[in-house]
Amino acid sequence: MQFSLKSGLLAVALAYSAHAATTITVASFPDLDRSAKAALDGFKKLHPDIEVKVVSLAYADHHNAMTTALATGANLPDVMAVDYDFIGKFSESGGLEDLAKAPYNGLQYKSQISRFSLPQGMSDTGALAAIPTDIGPGALFYRKDILDKAGVSEAELTKSWDSYLAAGKKVKAATGAYMLANAVDLKDIIIRANLKDGEGVYFDAKGNALVDNARFVKAFEVAKAARVAGIDGKIGAWSNEWSEGFKRNQIATQMMGAWLAGHLKNWLAPTQKGLWRSAQLPNGAYAAWGGSFYAIPKKTENKAAAWELIKYLTLNKQQQIAAFRAVDAFPSLIEAQNDSFIDEPIEYLGGQKARQLWRVAAGKIPASTVDKFDSVAKEIVNSELEKVLEQNKDIKAALADAKALIKRRVRR
Amino acid sequence: MSLSDPSTLALESTMDKAAPRRRKLRPWDWAPYVFISPFFILFAVFGVFPMLFSIYLSFHTWDPAAGLSAMRWVGIENYTFTLTDDWFQKSVFNTAWIAVVAGAPQHLIAIPLAFFLHTAFGRWRNAVVGFYFLPFITSSVAIALVFTTLFSRDYGVINQVLTQLGQLPVLEWIFPQQKIDWGQPEYTKWMISFVVFWRYVGWNTVLYLAAMQTIPKDLYEAATMDGAGKLQQFWHITVPMLKPMMFFAITLTIIGNLQLFEEPFIITGGTGGIDQAGKTAAMHMYNTAFMDGDFGTASAVAWLLFIAIALLTWVNNKIFAKSGMKD
């Protein structure tokens, strides 16, 4: 009797403690969800009292679901993953915790994280809405075999935009391959290159559109020159044509985030192993391509546990490297960038130690700011660029139109 | 159940005596309402509420990521902005263009096709109809992906066939020697229209075939006796007798085509293509809401679209009624 009472009490106590363990939910999207799942075991060891549940939706569905959740304040996760393309909209929304304030005091970790990435998670008012977990330093990928055949050196690619275009003509003439998939890519780099810290790509701090400045004129001119020279394939990224172009050796170079190496290896061009190389972007440009962030919604319970998990995901060296291994997500944590893992040769890139290059790039990318209307501006600028490329619209006129259109659409 | 219980019956009779005029509602009187309530509850939550809320929303500016408290009253500004907006006008033009080019052939081909299936195929008819119906039940995402592959500029089958034909003598006058870039704005709407036409022609065929089967056989027999040929029978019996179904099918096509979203969205990668040549009004609404984060304006677009559909359906109704076709 005594014994059974004791064991009964014990069972109740156990049940109670199991109940007391906090369960937090992480809402994420592929492939980022895999890096969160890779963290579960390590996090469990440090915090046995916190249960972590990772829920994942397709990329677009995830961000739509999070928009709805923030709108209604219902079904919010404790930890929310946000992609770079949405960070402007989400960080300015006011629905996320300001991680700069107590008890988080997130800004104390500023020096530990790639300098350009933390400001992207900040709103106009200086609130820190999200902490970066991975970054996408921009890189130039090129097909060494195609360039060799055309007699083009890497230096010719990267020296300047003019030399890049000249090299493209040689490649097209000698091999028939397109130098690059789409002239639009050139515009995307040039409008981001050589920004000063605190500047935005499309908007200044006061929200005025910058799209008619010299940066955009140059970007449009170079893109137009590439189209006129016939060296671009007019192929949109992520289209069928694009992946076929890689598989059939029809695209000689591609500028994108360093994570493209993983996509090339896994599905875009697995048979071209050893033929690709990476270099810095042409003309001394440094730009960021995407990146992922974690945030805590204001209307959630378990904020303390959520913050512990975010710190683990973003500031733990082992976890950052594990995520890098799992999904090719370049670490935002500087300590992880200095790990020996970075010095390992990449087999797919012909044994090149390309991560060292990407680390250099990560250190030089300007800390530009994001605006919640960036996606609107991007759509308008792209549409005007198409008119310049395809319908011979005057560049000055196109940019003036773009500015007027942005002003009209960003009316509030 | 409880009616079979004698005690309840007794109670019932005493209550009837006590209150002969105002009958009290007993639990089982509520039962039908309880059983039917799931529909009304679900309809209220997922049908009526969103509709009323979107009217309310269309007079506000609201970025949903900022939460409900961020709603701000702006009156009819969303409507005036949308009506004067180049992008909206362009998307409406595209929608109307595609609606006509994809919609009209659906019926012009479905009616003769249904007549052909009705008369030429005996017991194989259902199998043949099934094949025509397949595109309709296939996922529109899969269809759009297959067609973008077929229309691929460098590697697509369609360009290969066209350029091969362009190599042949005589045919080289008609067919292109160069590969056609179907992504160019002058082709975008044609491509979308073709896919939409291909997808829904089978559906309309089934509708017309069903209507044809209800036409009494003796009409045809009488016509044959009077010496009418197949073509005359088609013109003077089948077509007039199909009028009620035509009204129904054309109304469905108008509504469906004005709300066209999935096919152009996937074919153009969500952007509407170069110069927004393939952006429909429904896509404009989606992009305004989910890309620009402007749910107020998107609601206004939705209601303007609703008004346009209602008007066109009404016009369609009038045309059919006037010509005595609808009854």
Image (cartoon, coloured by chain):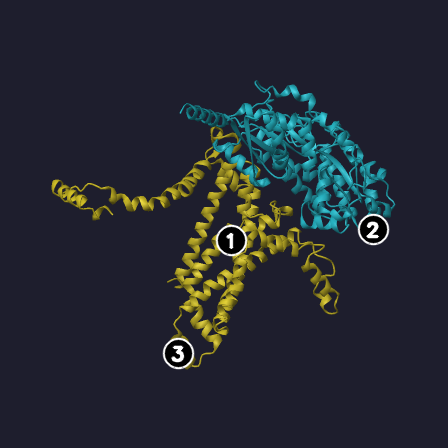
Chain colours: A cyan, B yellow
Residue picked out by circle 1: B257
Is label 2 in contact with label 1 (beta carbons under 8 Å)? no
Task: Indicate the quadrant containing the N terminus of chain A: top left, top right, bottom left or bottom right.
Answer: top left
Label 2 lies in what chain?
A: A
Query: To which chain does the residue with label 3 belong?
Result: B
Residue at mark 2 to residue at mark 1: CA–CA distance: 45 Å
Residue A255 position, x and y percent, is 74, 39
Element assignment for label 3: helix
Q: Amino acid at mark 1?
A: Asn
Q: Nearer the viewer, residue A103 or A179?
A: A103
Disc 2 marks which residue?
A175
Residue B89 can be seen in this image:
yes
Q: Position of residue B73 (x, y in %)?
A: 46, 31
- Badge 2, how many Cα within 10 Å: few under 14, some, many 20+? some
Q: Which mark is residue B149?
A: none
Q: Residues within 10 Å of mark 3 (few under 14, many from 20)?
A: few
Labels 2, 1: front one: 2
The answer to whether dots 1 and 3 both sit on one chain is: yes
